[in-house]
Image (cartoon, grey):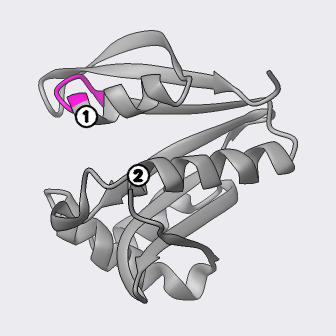
Amino acid sequence: MADAIIDLVGPEELPLVGDLYNKIFRPTRDLADIRQRFRGCHNVVMLVARLNDKPVGFFVGFELKPGVFFAWFCGVIPEMRRQGIASQLTEAAQSWAKLHDYETIRFECQNQHRPLLHMALNLGYDIVGIRWDSDHGDNVVVLEKSLHD
C-alpha cells in the first residue's frame, strides 16, 4: 500500500485538480466547467494525493445539504491505481467532514465502476439507492456512510 501525502488545497490549486481530472476521466472538462459546478456550493473541499511530491490523485466534495457532505469526484491516475490511494483520499475526506460536524458522507458511482464500489463497501459505505443516468446509459449507485458510528 502506498503511503500518499494528502494535502488540503485551496482554490489556487484548481488548475492542478483540473489537470488530474483530465488525466483520469473522459470527456475532459475545462476549468470554467469545474468552477461552474462549485458555484453556489458551500464548504468546497479539494484534496490532492502526492507520492514523492508528484500529484497522483484528487478528491473534490462539497456540502450537499446541512449535515450531508457529497463526494463529487475522486480519482487516481491509472498507473498509480490499486495502491490504496483512493482509500486514503476518501478517508481524509471523511475525517474532514466529521471534523466539520457532518453526519453523513454520500457519493454516487456508475454501476460499471466495480473497483470503486468494492472500495466503498470495504470502507463501510451502504448502498442507499440507485438511479438511471441517461447521459451514460447506466445505473448510478448511491452510497452513504454515517460519520458518527
Task: Determine whether the residue tagged by mark 2 lies in a helix, strand or loop.
Answer: helix
Q: Nearer the viewer, residue 42 or 78?
A: 78
Q: Which residue is mark 2?
A: 86
Q: Earlier in the sequence, mark 1 or mark 2?
A: 2
Give the answer, above or below, for where 100 lies relative to 50.
Answer: above
Residue type at mark 1 is Pro
Task: Determine whether the residue tagged by mark 1 lies in a helix, strand or loop.
Answer: helix
Q: Quadrant of residue 79?
A: bottom left
Label 1: few (<14), some (14–19) or many (≥20) C-alpha neighbours in 10 Å: few
Residue type at mark 2 is Ala
Image location (x, y in percent) of residue 37: 47, 57
Image location (x, y in percent) of residue 28: 18, 65
Q: Please state if 18 lies on the left or on the right of 35 as rendered.
A: left
Q: Quadrant of the N terminus?
A: bottom left
The residue drawn where x is 32% and y is 35% is 116
Label 2: few (<14), some (14–19) or many (≥20) C-alpha neighbours in 10 Å: many
Image location (x, y in percent) of residue 125: 54, 23
The residue drawn where x is 20% and y is 57% is 25
Magenta part of the protein: which range?
109-114
**Callouts 1 and 2 close, C-beta under 8 Å:** no
Q: Is 39 a magenta residue?
A: no
The residue drawn where x is 47% and y is 67% is 3
Give the answer, above or below, for where 5 lies relative to 148.
Answer: below
Q: Which residue is mark 1?
A: 115
Separation of disc 1 and disc 2 at Cα? 10 Å
Give the answer, above or below, for where 86 lies relative to 68.
Answer: below
Image location (x, y in percent) of residue 90: 53, 48
The residue drawn where x is 56% and y is 88% is 12
